[in-house]
């Protein structure tokens, strides 16, 4: 990890869940360069924070989806230990159908982007990153963002080891109990949310059908009023009540589909992110074992001039002998190679425990952050969900209370 | 033909007697179980709410005093001696309790319709269709639902009859609900036993004026029955309108209202099941979480569960308070159609009788003219002063008559007469006449004079009968139309009141559902708000 990240994580070790207060809103989608093939939507990002790295407590900028992608990628690359919240799907149906400027799509995206930035704002580490600051307040977007585009891949934990090593050790051979628990819990959460998603698709359809049924019934009552001329007015009003009741159903269904379900699906992708992250845990015990082997081989080579490892090296030596390769020279070269490798490994093994511990800590911290975020997000989600029902039933009470005295007044006119 | 035009069955200046002799043979209040063949019971004709002071039995008294409801308290499977199984329904009315099966309800209703063809007799739940039976085999749960529904609807039938101004006083209705009365016996005794198969053949039983059942007298020949496909020559516009309205109403109820109502009912059922599933999911979900969040999710799950329960209540209440009455009204529309049809047929009948009467009168006219002609010829022949030519001329003035070939024969006889007498001037005309007629008789073996006289007599008789019938039918039609109009008015009032009740029930049940759910979801929302972040 680069020092920047290390020092930050040390600091936030002490207080895992306290990020600086930060409120971000994504609003006012605007279609720019309308009419040209380069048209796109930009969003107004307004940030209010007490974080001192920002130039002022309130700041607003306009950004487009591409810019969000830069932010996401930069953070994912440099803060490999952190769970970077996901962006909404880039390749959505609407791109194909050409509807990416349609109001519903834009609104869904706006809401999703806001969730993305809000999650970042709650993350103690990520909220303080330079990338984030640039994104939220830079007035020289092109210049500042391209600076960082050129930046070499950072000295992340994994980059130092080299890809080959990383791949060799990237599996959970002896999973830490703690991580098993975490993974199981996230699995259960995912399962629950998926079940809700599935069932709700059925419910949405059902409610939509119910809305139509009520409308038809309302018409039939009004129709009866046309036949029964003595009670035409009250029956028409009854038909009207039913029609408004159907409207209320429609509104609740809309809120459930576009609010509740959208949030749940978004949250599911977030869960998925967290799980993927866990899988990257490297078994450092294996790493040190590997180092030991390398050390042993060096010993062998120095003492016997022969590589202790197996037939392939014997064969190579034999071949070399036949070829008349200078054994001493080859030995020297090999030793040199081994040495540098060993030096590397030694350094890493030294670090490895630290890193391993550090890594575990990071994952645990990220999970804490995730849990906190989960509580906040689930609360918001459920609140809106409960509210959509409360709104529906409140409207219902009003409508039905209104029509009863009108019906009571029906008198037979001879 | 002029008679027909004079008939106006709907004239307002009808000298109609409102009160009819009402005889009761109330031997005792308690022992009306004994059926006496010669009981004279005349049915009360016009409803006068304050007037009823005379009752035929205790039940009658009960029904007409205050809030009286009939209940069907139970339904049980019964097996009779023959081994067949059926359901009997226990009826409790006042102090009476009796068990009747569906077919008995059916026959009660049929009897009421035949006794009171001008009244709108309330419907009973339909017989189960074969398809229903087939698909229901082994579905015990649906069986119970079906039986409960039948109980409710049969109960509604009995109560509607008991609230009908005329039908409520009908004694066979009381007998139906009386303990220990064999319905079979009631069916085979007076008055039901003396109703003709075709009610069109007599005056409507409920509107007859005589104490003795007019339908029973054999001296009274059955009335002509028209063909139903015939068109009325002078239809009554008011009833044409009623018929059209009933058709529209019937259509709207069954094609429109019943269908859309059923769809909602079914869909709410599905919705309720969805929510049952959803509630379970939330409850499971809450177990995987902890702290405030778990409580919040649990509370949401509870709100969902209670929505499921409340929706179940809504569905069953709507069924009883809206769907079933709606079904009754759909059936009522058919009943009205039948009643209007009865009137229509009576109207056709009246026109047919009038037409037939006219034809007979014309026939009689013809016959009488022939008679006169024959007599005149006799006179002339006996005088011997008349030239054959003049005779011939007069003969040519004879009209052709439709009725009977006797007249034709007679004409021939007549025609042959002058020829004969023309040639035989010296012969006595009467002698030739009688010789000729004897000859013809010899050939035909019939006496034209006697035949004609017979014919005239019969036609005169027929005409008298037809005139009586026409009078009766015309009077009947007036009464029928009035009775139907009154009952239609009464029905309209009842319908509006029932519709009002149904719609209020619909609204109230939905209101209750909304209120219950509102309070549960508000609670859930409050619990979610408690979550610490």
Image (tube, grey):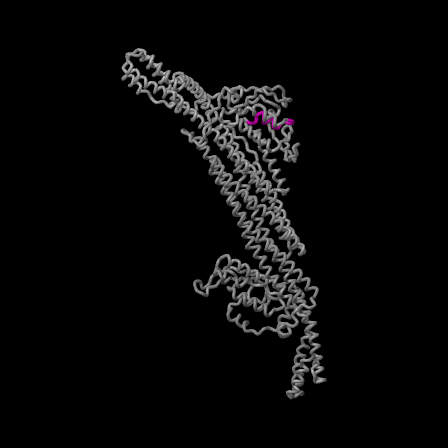
Q: Viewed as shown, does residue A84 lie left or right of B336?
A: right
Examine the image and state in which quarter residue B56 appears: top right
**Near-viewer residue (A53 or B438):** B438
The image shows residue B251 at horizontal and vertical percentages of 49, 38
Residue B122 against residue B431 in the figure, above or below:
below
Give B390 or A351, whichever is nearer the viewer: B390
Q: Residue at x 44, y 32 (%)?
A: B229
**Is residue A1 visible in this depiction of the protein?**
no
The quadrant in which residue A187 appears is: bottom right
| Residue B274 visible in the picture | yes
Q: Residue at x 66, y 78 (%)?
A: A344
Where, by quadrant of the figure, is residue B455 drawn? top left
Where's the C terminus of chain B, which quadrant? bottom right
Q: Main secondary structure of the magenta part?
A: helix
In this rendering, the answer to whether A405 lies above or below A61 is above
Q: How many marks?
A: 0
How far across and down, in percent of the image, does residue A404 sit? 54, 39
Q: Position of residue A166 (x, y in %)?
A: 64, 72
Picture coordinates of residue B144 (x, y %)? Answer: 63, 40
| Residue A5 lies within the magenta run | no
Quadrant holding the N terminus of chain B? top left
Q: Which residues are magenta?
A: B167-180
Q: Between residues B293 and A221, which one lies in front from this camera angle? A: A221
Please give the name of the residue rendered at 66% of the width and 80% of the height, measured from the top-left corner.
Answer: A340
- Camera-side residue of B365 and A124: B365
């Amino acid at each position: 990890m680069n020092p920047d990240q290390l020092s930050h994580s040390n600091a936030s070790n002490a207080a895992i869940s306290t990020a600086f207060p930060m409120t971000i809103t994504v609003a006012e989608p605007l279609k720019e360069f309308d009419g040209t093939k380069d048209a796109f939507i930009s969003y107004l990002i307004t940030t209010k924070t007490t974080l001192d790295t920002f130039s002022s407590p309130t700041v607003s900028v306009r950004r487009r989806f591409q810019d969000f992608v830069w932010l996401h990628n930069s953070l994912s690359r440099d803060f490999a230990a952190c769970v970077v919240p996901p962006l909404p799907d880039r390749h959505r149906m609407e791109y194909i159908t050409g509807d990416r400027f349609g109001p519903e799509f834009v609104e869904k995206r706006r809401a999703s982007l806001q969730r993305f930035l809000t999650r970042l704002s709650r993350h103690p580490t990520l909220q303080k990153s330079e990338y984030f600051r640039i994104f939220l307040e830079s007035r020289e977007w092109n210049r500042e963002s391209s600076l960082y585009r050129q930046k070499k891949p950072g000295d992340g934990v994994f980059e130092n080891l080299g890809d080959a090593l990383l791949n060799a050790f990237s599996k959970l051979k002896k999973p830490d109990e703690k991580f098993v628990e975490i993974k199981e819990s996230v699995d259960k959460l995912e399962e629950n949310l998926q079940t809700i998603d599935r069932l709700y698709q059925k419910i949405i359809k059902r409610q939509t059908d119910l809305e139509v049924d009520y409308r038809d019934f309302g018409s039939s009552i009004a129709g009866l009023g046309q036949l029964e001329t003595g009670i035409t007015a009250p029956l028409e009003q009854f038909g009207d009540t039913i029609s408004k009741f159907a409207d209320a159903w429609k509104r609740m269904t809309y809120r459930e589909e576009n609010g509740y379900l959208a949030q749940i699906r978004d949250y599911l992708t977030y869960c998925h992110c967290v799980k993927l992250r866990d899988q990257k845990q490297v078994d450092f015990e294996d790493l040190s074992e590997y180092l030991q082997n390398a050390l042993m081989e060096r010993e062998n080579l120095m003492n016997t001039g022969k590589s202790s490892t197996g037939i392939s090296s014997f064969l190579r030596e034999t071949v070399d002998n036949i070829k008349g390769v200078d054994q001493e020279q080859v030995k020297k070269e090999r030793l040199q190679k081994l040495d540098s490798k060993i030096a590397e490994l030694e350094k890493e093994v030294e670090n490895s425990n630290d890193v391993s511990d550090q890594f575990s800590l990071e994952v645990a911290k990220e999970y804490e952050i995730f849990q906190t975020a989960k509580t906040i997000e689930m609360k918001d989600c459920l609140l809106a969900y409960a509210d959509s029902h409360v709104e529906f039933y409140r409207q219902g009470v009003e409508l039905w209370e209104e029509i009863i005295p009108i019906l009571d007044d029906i008198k037979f006119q001879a | 033909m002029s008679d027909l035009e004079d008939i106006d069955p709907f004239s307002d200046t009808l000298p109609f007697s409102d009160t009819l002799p009402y005889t009761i043979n109330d031997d005792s209040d308690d022992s009306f179980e004994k059926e006496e063949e010669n009981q004279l019971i005349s049915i009360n004709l016009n409803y006068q709410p304050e007037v009823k002071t005379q009752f035929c039995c205790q039940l009658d008294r009960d029904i007409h005093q205050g809030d009286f409801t009939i209940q069907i308290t139970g339904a049980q499977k019964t097996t009779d001696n023959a081994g067949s199984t059926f359901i009997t329904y226990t009826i409790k009315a006042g102090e009476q309790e009796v068990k009747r099966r569906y077919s008995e309800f059916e026959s009660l209703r049929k009897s009421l319709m035949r006794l009171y063809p001008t009244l709108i007799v309330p419907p009973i739940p339909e017989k189960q269709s074969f398809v229903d039976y087939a698909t229901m085999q082994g579905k015990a749960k649906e069986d119970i639902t079906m039986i409960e529904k039948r109980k409710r609807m049969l109960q509604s039938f009995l109560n509607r009859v008991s609230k009908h101004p005329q039908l409520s006083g009908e004694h066979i209705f009381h007998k139906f609900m009386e303990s220990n009365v064999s319905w079979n016996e009631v069916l085979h005794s007076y008055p039901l036993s003396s109703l003709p198969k075709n009610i069109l053949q007599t005056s409507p039983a409920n509107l007859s004026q005589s104490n003795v059942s007019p339908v029973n007298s054999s001296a009274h020949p059955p009335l002509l029955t028209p063909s139903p496909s015939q068109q009325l020559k002078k239809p009554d516009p008011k009833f044409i309108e009623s018929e059209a309205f009933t058709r529209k109403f019937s259509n709207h109820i069954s094609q429109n209202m019943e269908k859309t109502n059923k769809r909602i009912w079914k869909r709410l059922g599905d919705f309720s099941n969805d929510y049952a599933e959803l509630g379970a999911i939330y409850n499971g979900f809450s177990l995987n979480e902890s702290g405030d969040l778990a409580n919040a999710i649990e509370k949401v799950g509870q709100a969902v569960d209670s929505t499921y329960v409340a929706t179940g209540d809504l569905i069953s209440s709507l069924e009883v308070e809206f769907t079933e009455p709606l079904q009754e009204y759909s059936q009522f529309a058919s009943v009205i159609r039948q009643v209007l049809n009865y009137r229509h047929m009576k109207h056709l009948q009246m026109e047919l009788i009038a037409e037939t009467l006219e034809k007979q009168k014309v026939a009689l006219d013809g016959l009488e003219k022939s008679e006169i002609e024959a007599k005149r010829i006799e006179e002339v022949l006996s005088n011997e002063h008349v030239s054959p030519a003049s005779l011939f001329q007069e003969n040519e003035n004879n009209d052709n008559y439709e009725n009977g070939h006797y007249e034709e024969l007679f004409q021939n006889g007549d025609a042959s007469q002058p020829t004969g007498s023309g040639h035989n001037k010296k012969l006595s005309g009467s002698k030739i006449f009688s010789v000729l007629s004897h000859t013809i008789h010899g050939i035909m073996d019939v006496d034209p004079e006697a035949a004609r006289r017979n014919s005239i007599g019969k036609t005169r008789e027929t005409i008298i009968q037809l005139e009586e019938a026409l009078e009766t039918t015309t009077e009947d039609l007036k009464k029928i139309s009035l009775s139907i109009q009154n009952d239609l008015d009464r029905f309209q009032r009842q319908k509006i009141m029932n519709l009002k009740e149904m719609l209020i029930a619909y609204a109230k049940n939905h209101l209750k559902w909304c209120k219950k759910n509102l309070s549960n979801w508000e609670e859930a929302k409050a619990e979610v708000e408690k979550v610490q972040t």
